[in-house]
Image (spheres, rainbow, N blue to C red):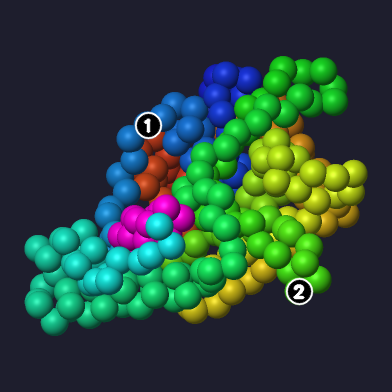
Amino acid sequence: MTVTMPRPNPQHSRLYPSHLEKFRQCRRRYHLQFVERRPSHARVTPALTKGNVAHQVLKICTTEWQESASMPADLRALVAPRLPRDDYPSEVAWESDVAQVVAWIKYGLSYLDPYAEVLGVERFLDRTYFPEDGSGPIPLGVVIDLLLLRTDSNGKRFLEIVDYKTGRNLDGSVFTPVISRFVLKRLIETQLPGDGFAPVVFTELYVAKQHVRSSELTLERCLTDWEEVKRALAAIAAETTWAPSPSPLCEWCPFNGNGCDPMREEQSLSLW
């Protein structure tokens, strides 16, 4: 079954890396979530709650570090009220998750050092992209968890974008690093003036896995990754059918049964 739906108008809505990731994963879900803006049937899981609490407390702590170079003394006192006790079957289970989130936060904060200047905490940045084909402008945006100005061992300054990850998978985003650098252009020119391609590092801090993955956003990498961004933007603008991409993940998709029944639609394509 083919469903024809209205064409999106990227010129009138800001696009984030998560939009492009969702479109690549499943075009129907992208349409339901970002174009039709349907309410989802997503279930709030303990993992999602813990991740949200970790991000909230990390924001509190890094903001205090930015403003006064100090840290809250009692992380548990920040975590416990934000993790609903009523959602747990026992006191032991709740205390275990409180301790786990505190450990995540401690690991995230251990990445800070007194020599790095904090330029932003959960900082929203945007910039408009003008396609080479003359089509309408497309506003792009990101929210950067932590933005640092660092100095390397040779005395050269560079920017570091830190993205906190609370999930257990080490899957990185294809679009987030390069779009982050794209929207940072004005700030880069202010903080790192010069004729060369300013050094910027993108770091994924997996607090649950206690793993750090950093890479420099070189000119070569940015040019390559930007081609992926352009292809995704062009595909979104040209899409008309919004066909689903059935997979085992459909079972947990918050839009399955809410405007999309991908397995049934897949079966209806069969000749027999």
Image-based side of 90 in relation to 44, left or right: left
Q: Is residue 167 left or right of residue 196?
A: left
Quarter of the view holding residue 162 = bottom right
Q: Nearer the viewer, residue 120 or 91?
A: 120
Q: Which residue is mark 2?
A: 153
Nearest to N terminus: mark 2 or mark 1: 1
Relative horizontal placement of residue 27, taking residue 48 as reference (left or right): right
Which residue type does callout 1 highlight? Answer: Arg
Residue at coordinates 70% horizontally, 21% vertically from top-left?
A: 137
The image shows residue 73, relative to residue 186, as above or below, that is below
Say whether residue 164 is magenta.
no
| Image coords of residue 30 (percent x, y) | 52, 38
Residues rendered magenta in the picture: 52-67
| Image quarter (top left, top right, bottom left or bottom right) of the N terminus | top right
Q: Which mark is residue 38?
A: 1
Q: Is residue 84 above or below residue 108?
A: above
Mark 2 neighbour density, 10 Å: few (under 14) some (14–19) many (20 or more): few
- Looking at the picture, does residue 129 appear above or below residue 47? above
Note whether residue 256 is visible: yes
Tell me how far mark 2 sits from mark 1, CA to CA: 50 Å
Residue 25, can we see it? Answer: no
Q: Is residue 85 left or right of residue 195?
A: left
Amino acid at pointer 2: Ser
Seen at 65% across and 31% down, the residue is: 127
**Which percent across, then down, holds residue 131?**
79, 26
